[in-house]
């Protein structure tokens, strides 16, 4: 049902949810994170999608996934993140600390923001880093009449690593629910505060 070109499809499509089965919907309503393994571009690297419901409206969740300079404060394994500017273009610099035998990774990516309230998307593409390929997206869609958010995280990456793809894919699948949970916790921690800046 989902193919290797999922990120291209997501980029070109309207801001709609991917197809959800009755079981998917039931799991999401229970607070579970639904993980879908995808075929990475060219058959190399890692590709996956994670879906989860956040108990906040999309406009409240948006700054959390939009402003990558704050990822170091709450995203799993993120040891540093900042926004750099190069020739007038903002780049997201992220450094990840990975478990042995994988080596730490870093990337600088260029983001495209799509803001069609109450629907939002942040897509990124690799500029440079310790990857052959690193692209993905965060998509926020209204859920439960707009009181909650369906969070859709898609990634298609090929780290420059000697670790076999099978091990990297297994590790990625296990880590994806933690990413969604970290966003939920971050949204909750920011409630009542001033929020974040671009």
Image: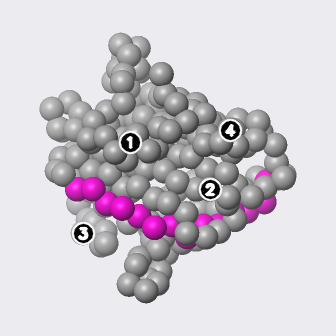
Q: Work out how far the residue at label 2 is from the one at label 4, CA to CA, in angstroms.
A: 12 Å
Q: Which residue is mark 4?
A: 43
Please say whether residue 107 is one of the residues in the magenta stretch.
Answer: yes
Q: Which residue is mark 3?
A: 194
Span highlighted in magenta in the image: 102-115
Q: Principal SS element in the magenta part?
A: strand
Considering only order in the chain, which callout, 4 or 1, is on the residue closer to the N terminus?
Answer: 1
Q: Which residue is mark 2?
A: 133
Dot 3 and dot 1 residues touching (CB under 8 Å): no
Q: Is residue 24 above or below residue 184?
A: above
Q: Which residue is mark 1?
A: 10
Q: Secondary structure at mark 2?
A: strand
Considering only order in the chain, which callout, 4 or 2, is on the residue closer to the N terminus?
Answer: 4
Instruction: Give the crowd class for mark 4: few <14, some 14-19, many >=20 residues within 10 Å.
Output: few
Dot 1 and dot 4 residues touching (CB under 8 Å): no
Left or right side of 178 for 20: left
**What residue do we see at 76% from left, 41% from top?**
165
Viewer-nearest residue: 189 or 130: 130
Q: Work out how far the residue at label 1 is from the one at label 4, CA to CA, in angstroms.
A: 19 Å
Q: Quadrant of the C terminus?
A: bottom left
Query: Horizontal and vertical percent for residue 37?
Result: 58, 31
**What residue do we see at 32% from left, 51% from top?**
121
The answer to which quarter of the image holds residue 12 is: top left
Considering only order in the chain, which callout, 3 or 4, is on the residue closer to the N terminus?
Answer: 4
**What residue do we see at 69% from left, 65% from top?**
130
């Amino acid at each position: 049902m989902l193919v290797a070109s999922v990120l291209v499809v997501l980029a070109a499509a309207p801001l709609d949810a991917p197809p959800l089965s009755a079981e998917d919907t039931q799991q999401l309503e229970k607070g579970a994170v639904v993980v879908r393994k995808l075929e990475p571009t060219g058959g190399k690297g890692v590709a996956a999608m994670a879906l989860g419901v956040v108990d906040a409206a999309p406009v409240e969740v948006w700054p959390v996934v939009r402003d990558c300079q704050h990822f170091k404060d709450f995203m799993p394994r993120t040891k540093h993140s900042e926004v750099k500017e190069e020739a007038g273009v903002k780049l997201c610099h992220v450094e990840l600390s990975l478990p042995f035998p994988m080596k730490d990774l870093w990337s600088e990516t260029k983001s495209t923001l799509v803001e069609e309230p109450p629907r939002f998307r942040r897509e990124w593409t690799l500029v440079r880093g310790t990857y052959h390929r690193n692209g993905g997206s965060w998509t926020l869609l209204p859920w439960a009449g707009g009181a909650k958010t369906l969070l859709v995280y898609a990634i298609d990456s090929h780290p420059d690593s000697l670790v076999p793809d099978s091990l990297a894919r297994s590790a990625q699948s296990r880590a994806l629910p933690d990413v969604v949970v970290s966003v939920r916790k971050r949204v909750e921690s920011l409630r009542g505060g001033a929020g974040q800046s671009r």
